[in-house]
Amino acid sequence: MAFKELDTAGWQALDSAHYLHPFTDHANLAKTGSRVAVRGEGVYVWDNNGDRIIDGLSGLGCVNIGYGRPELAKAVYDQMLDLSYCQSFFNTTHRSAVELADTLTSMLPEGLNHVFFQSSGSEANETAVRLIRKYWDLVGRPEKRVIIARELAYHGSTHMAASLSGITPMHYAGGDLPLPGIARINTPYQYRHGANMTADDFGVVAARWLEDKILEIGPENVAAFFAEPAQSAGGAICPPMTYWPEVQRICRKYDVLLVADEVVCGFGRTGDWFGCYHYGFVPDIMQLGKGLTSGYLPLSACVISDRITDVLIGLGGEWAHGYTYSGHPACCAVALENIRILREEKIVENAKAELVPYFKAKLETFVDHPLIGDVRSVGLMGGLEIVKDKKTGESYLYEEHIGPYCSAEAMKRGLAFRANGDTMSLMPPLVITKDQLDTVFDIAREALDATAKHLGKM
Ligand code: PMP
């Protein structure tokens, strides 16, 4: 039978028989069946049954520019006809990669002048760790090895990236994780760790946890601090504005490299082009992914400061690291076109001026909802934390799967609304309109109301 003649149940059966999905309970999925997506345009995705879903999540925080832009498809098509593949190992380069590296470094803070490309955020984080370790070796301080990461961090799913991540179920999935050489501190999650303080005070207190950890390990042993400007998968944990400047001060004081995983925050998610601009700091290494191509093709970038490349290029000899698809021409071409559109249509600037205040105000209307204990956001990344007891902040047990229940209720009504634990997250495309945001929030409320009824709270 031709594949195209399958009905939804047919696709679901084949999916279940052969396709393993990321972060999925497959026994459960076999019961419910996958949603079979067939088309995307703007902020909408249609499934095989003809149902339209408004994508409150930009796919996975990547489709910042919206689905189905023909200019991006054309950029890929043209590049593939010109030069469909190019290795960059053996003294070879190509125009799209060079142009993209030049474009990115011109958009980023001074002193970040080199770019290494790979396909995913996880791989960009692997590159960052190899660079960190290589750097300290080359400058004759190999004892500086410990990387400090945070609770509830998400840095990806390869061994090192999963080890840096602070979402603990990931450490059991493959066994033997986290890898050695990683220390962990708590995260600037004010609702849980500083509710009795002002945001400004809490930001400084949370940053000082880094200083405490550096002193505990000994600054001579600490290589880097590795963190997302705002944490997305951890549950939209958005630090106070005092946090990052203090973190930067501490890193400089103890000569600890500051590494910003901007895989989600980069390209407008925080309301500014990059999280480091929003929060006011300059990293030594910065990882970009997702919004770099708006998800049209897989590409990530590890952007590296002169401090590191001066040593790597000056002393390093061969940099024995890289991927077949480092700087893939089609991926670089689509990133360039994506950046061109974002700039020409002022998508980030318009989102900041028009959408961000509206999004924040809409989120805040949920403060009074019987299930919501905390509301938080930065830019177009927001979280509504479901709690069992609004007074004490007590959570539901993980096994009760309340977040996923709410997520399923939203999907029934046509909204992609993600549960990160019990925090319901929204990360809409930066091109969403206010009317479309109204729909997102109407459905989000219906889904939360349905969840509250299910729990006997309404
Ligand atoms: N870093 C952050 C902050 C992320 O949110 C993610 C993915 N959600 C990654 C890294 C990993 O990226 P990828 O899935 O492309 O490997």
Image (spheres, rainbow, N blue to C red):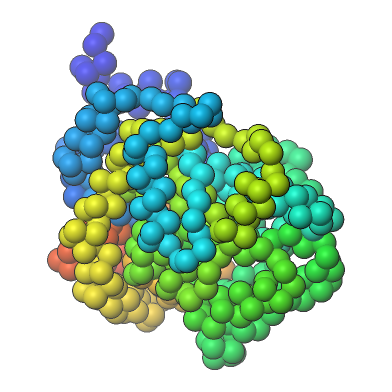
Residue at figure coordinates x 23%, y 29% from the top left:
77
Taking the view exactly as shown, the residue that stands out farthest to the front is: 314
Residue at figure coordinates x 30%, y 63% from the top left:
444
Image quadrant assignment for residue 48: top left
Decide: is 4 above or below 34: above
Residue 342: image location, x then y, percent: 25, 57
Image quadrant assignment for residue 254: bottom right
Residue 235: image location, x then y, percent: 50, 63
Decide: is 147 above or below 78: below
Decide: is 207 above or below 333: below
Residue at figure coordinates x 56%, y 58% from the top left:
305
Which quarter of the image is occupied by the C terminus?
bottom left
Residue 439 appears in view: no
Residue 144: image location, x then y, percent: 79, 58
Residue at figure coordinates x 49%, y 39% from the top left:
118
Residue 147 appears in view: yes
Residue 376: image location, x then y, percent: 43, 74
Which quarter of the image is occupied by the N terminus?
top left
Image quadrant assignment for residue 321: top right
Frontmost residue, 67 versus 278: 278
Direction from residue 136 to residue 31 in the image, left or right:
left
Frontmost residue, 375 versus 323: 323
